[in-house]
Amino acid sequence: MKRSYGYFAFCFLFFFCTLGSRPAKSATDYNITQVFVVGMSSDLEHAAGTVTNVIRKVMRNTPGITVLDLNKRLTANAPPEVKARKEKARKALAKAKEALKNMDYAASLKYAKLARKAFEKMGGYLEPLDRYKESILLIGVAHGMMGDIKSAQRAFLDLLLLDPHLNLPKGGFEAFVVDLFKKVKNNLQSQAVGSLSIKSDPPGANLYLDGKLKDVTPLTLDGVIAGPHLVVIKQPGYQNWGKVVNVAAGTQDIIEAPLVAGQAGSAFVRTMTRACRAVTESDSLEDVLALGQVLGLDWAILGQLSMDAYDHKLRLYLFEFSHAKSVYEDELVVDPSYGLENDVKTFALDFIRKGKRALARFRQREDPLSGKTGTEDWNRDTGGNTKKHSVTKARNYNDAKDQKTEDPLDDVDGTEDW
């Protein structure tokens, strides 16, 4: 098969970008996978991104497969100033908590504001989010203890915009502070709203609002409560983009986010797009194989989203990389006016179930060294009976998530149970 210069450059660049971060793969890890869907025309890019996220969510809940974390695998280095800002925020927050403990509310307010400002300057790398929330909490508490009720309410509103489910325990703070927080929370849904129109270059990036994945760019969000909101945009291979945006009541704020490519960012997007388009062409599989090789995938679901009259047509292929072969395919035709997500979710569940069966049958049937070394019959006994090739389920890393408590912080300081 002919290899283009771009193919070798892509593989070379990815090798060095991911050196040291490539996951160790045991003999039983045969189900490391991902899904990629592209729009066959520019007006379908957003819908293709939505479809991709729906299928990924289904895959993460499917036992026996490991969905590769693209953000970790293709991490672009954060700007150098992010680390310094994070440290500045950490130190200021520690001083704010110490001052609050000593009932020096003016000092606590000063340092909490410094911490919040430093966190917000981290942009798309603002973390940990719980510490950022804590800085806002301390601002509200300090204002309340100093008798500035309006400023305390404003800070509590900012905090609840980030997480409307937060609660303050009665024993953690003065009773009137807890009551003030509850009052703001109870009035949250009566606040004025605005909207956000968000675009990124390149499009199709994951959009997070206040730490929660919403959809892919470009995207318009209506009914957003007026006030500060954390907008973060993530695209594998690119630096995170982020900003705290003050949404104005009754208006639409427009955000245009140019994403900065890491060493392999734009190359990945191009190769992924070409791989999805070329999966049906047996003589043009170099980009498909490159995608699997550099990501360390055993198989992947590659998809094409196109228009068929007034409907969307989604064609999926389960591609097995070690044999460079599509082992299962299926198609969904859906009316976009009724929404894609539910139909795609149902279709994905069925596709993955049938696709895994087809993959298992294919692996049992195929000789892994066929046509390569002259040892095609290595797994046959003298009677001519083929031994079954056992396919062991990969570890499901998605079920090994960190145990979380109800406490949004940790047990380091005296505000553990806020």
Image (cartoon, helix red, strand yellow):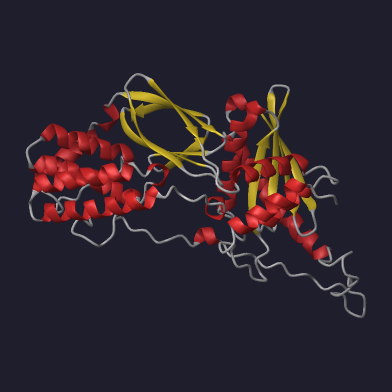
Quarter residue 348 falls in: top right
| Residue positioned 51% across, 60% down in the render | 399
Position of residue 96 relative to residue 345, above or below, is below
| Residue positioned 21% across, 37% down in the render | 155
Could you tell me if residue 366 is visible in this image? yes
Position of residue 174 relative to residue 164, above or below, is below
Q: Residue furthest top?
A: 250
**What x and y, as percent, mark residue 10?**
68, 50
> What count of labels does the image hold?
0
| Residue positioned 58% across, 48% down in the render | 263
Q: Nearer the viewer, residue 20 or 172?
A: 20
Position of residue 262 relative to residue 190, above or below, is below
232 relative position to 159: left or right: right
**What x and y, as percent, mark residue 79?**
44, 47
Q: Nearer the viewer, residue 14 or 43?
A: 14
Q: Residue furthest bottom?
A: 382
**What x and y, as percent, mark residue 151?**
15, 34
252 relative position to 336: left or right: left
Position of residue 265 relative to residue 404, above or below, is above
357 relative position to 250: left or right: right
40 relative position to 168: left or right: right
| Residue positioned 36% across, 23% down in the render | 194
**What x and y, as percent, mark residue 265?**
59, 45
Could you tell me if residue 67 is visible in this image? no
